[in-house]
Image (spheres, rainbow, N blue to C red):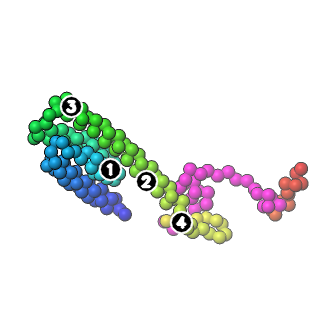
């Protein structure tokens, strides 16, 4: 997938999440001040946080409760005071923002894990004589370099007892 496709997908997800948020807020408005749907706010906030990151998730987590507060103060004749309605909105913002942080962390960890799995998964074309590995650009690399470039692994070299015996005629048993 090329970068413009990823941007297009993220833009579409943002658009759909925005439309869904507006629909939820409209349903929230028409249901009146006493029936509340803040749990449904988690759906668009989760989607935006997962695909578009923490900033967009926080934006949705702040705007949606503030729109609800606006409904309470401007459109509805509510029995609550301004302080009670504002405190309610602030609590929602804090809870939804905390949820955004959790979703964003989970998404980042999942992406990292997927990258590591992709790095270490699959068949490696390796020369049966020199043990070099062919990369995606058809270049042959030394096995140690190939693995070091794609992971945190480092190498130290030694000689196993079988090769010591085979190539040098020396065995561990003779040492003792």
Question: Measuring 62% from the left and 69% from the top, which residue is drawn there?
Answer: 127
Instruction: State the image coordinates of residue 81 (x, y, percent, origin top left).
Output: 16, 30
Q: Distance between the residues labelled 1 and 4?
A: 32 Å
Instruction: Give the number of the disc on residue 84.
Output: 3
Instruction: State the image coordinates of residue 75 (x, y, percent, origin top left).
Output: 10, 41
Question: Measuring 70% from the left and 53% from the top, which residue is drawn there?
Answer: 157
Q: Which of marks 3 and 2 is nearer the N terminus?
A: 3
Mark 1, secondary structure of its residue? helix
Q: Name the residue under label 4.
A: 122
Q: Which of marks 3 and 1 is nearer the N terminus?
A: 1
Q: Local crowd at mark 2 within 10 Å, few (<14), some, or many (≥20)?
A: few
Q: Nearer the viewer, mark 3 or mark 2?
A: 3
Q: Distance between the residues labelled 3 and 1?
A: 27 Å
Instruction: State the image coordinates of residue 83 (x, y, percent, origin top left).
Output: 19, 29
Q: Mark 1 points at which residue?
A: 46
Q: Distance between the residues labelled 4 and 2?
A: 18 Å
Q: Mark 2 points at which residue?
A: 111
Q: Local crowd at mark 1 within 10 Å, few (<14), some, or many (≥20)?
A: many
88 w.r.t. 168: above or below: above
């Amino acid at each position: 997938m090329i970068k413009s496709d990823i941007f297009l997908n993220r833009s579409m997800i943002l658009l759909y999440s925005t439309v869904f948020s507006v629909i939820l807020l409209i349903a929230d408005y028409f249901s009146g001040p006493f029936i509340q749907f803040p749990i449904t706010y988690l759906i668009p906030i989760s989607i935006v946080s997962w695909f578009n990151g923490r900033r967009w998730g926080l934006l949705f987590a702040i705007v949606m409760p503030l729109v609800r507060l606006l409904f309470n103060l401007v459109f509805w004749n509510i029995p609550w005071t301004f302080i009670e309605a504002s405190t309610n909105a602030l609590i929602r913002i804090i809870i939804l923002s905390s949820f955004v942080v959790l979703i964003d962390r989970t998404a980042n960890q999942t992406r990292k894990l997927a990258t590591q799995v992709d790095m270490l998964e699959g068949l490696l074309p390796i020369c049966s004589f020199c043990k070099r590995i062919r990369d995606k650009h058809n270049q042959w690399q030394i096995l140690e370099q190939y693995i070091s470039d794609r992971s945190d692994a480092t190498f130290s070299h030694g000689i196993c007892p079988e090769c010591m015996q085979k190539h040098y005629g020396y065995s561990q048993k003779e040492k003792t």
